Image (cartoon, grey):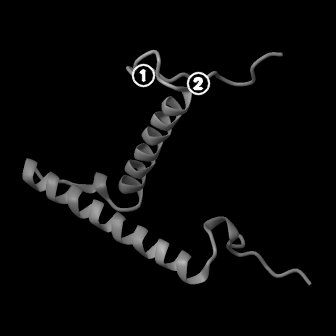
Amino acid sequence: MALVGRAKYDLSNLPPETARRALANTIKTRWVCEQAHQQLKAELGLDHFEGRSWTGLHRHALMTCIARTYLQHLRLAEHRRTGRGKNDDPPSGAAAIT
């Protein structure tokens, strides 16, 4: 059976005796960090900094991280209030079928 698409590989410097589960958790953690960084850039303006100082860059990065934390807090509060998950919502613009 031939592989469809490309095979994906991950490199790690964990010891060879590391359990597969621990390795998988490490890989997933990296993916979560990358997704958070993409959200900070795309939705919250991390990449819009135009200053010239190291301090200014750090302040800008801190403010975008604070904004992301606040938005996550609002999402979780809404989830607890309604008891609905992200995947439970109907698609936007979906009309009721009778």
Asked which quadrant contains residue 51, the reply is: bottom left
Circle 1 SS class = loop
**Which residue matches tag 2?**
8
Circle 2 SS class = loop
Q: Which amino acid type is shown beneath numbered disc 2? A: Lys
> Within 10 Å of the Cα at label 1, are there few (<14), some (14-19), or many (20+) other Cα atoms?
few
Using residue 50 as the reference point, say whether residue 34 is left or right of it: right
From this view, report whether residue 12 is shown above or below residue 41.
Answer: above
Tell me where residue 62 appears, x and y as whole percent. Answer: 21, 59
Asked which quadrant contains residue 81, the reply is: bottom right
Which residue appears at 30% of the width and 52% of the height?
Answer: 47
Using residue 25 as the reference point, say whether residue 64 is left or right of it: left
Q: Which amino acid type is shown beneath numbered disc 1? A: Ser
Q: Mark 2–mark 1 contact, CB under 8 Å?
A: no
Q: Which quadrant of the figure contains the C terminus? A: bottom right
> Within 10 Å of the Cα at label 2, are there few (<14), some (14-19), or many (20+) other Cα atoms?
few
Query: How much space separates mark 2 and mark 1, taking CA atoms?
Result: 13 Å
Q: Which quadrant of the figure contains the N terminus? A: top right
Report the number of discs: 2
Q: Report the mark closest to the observer, 2 or 1.
A: 1
Which residue appears at 79% of the width and 16% of the height?
Answer: 2
Tell me where residue 80 appears, x and y as whole percent. Answer: 54, 78
Using residue 4 as the reference point, say whether residue 48 is left or right of it: left
**Which residue matches tag 1?**
12
Asked which quadrant contains residue 59, the reply is: bottom left
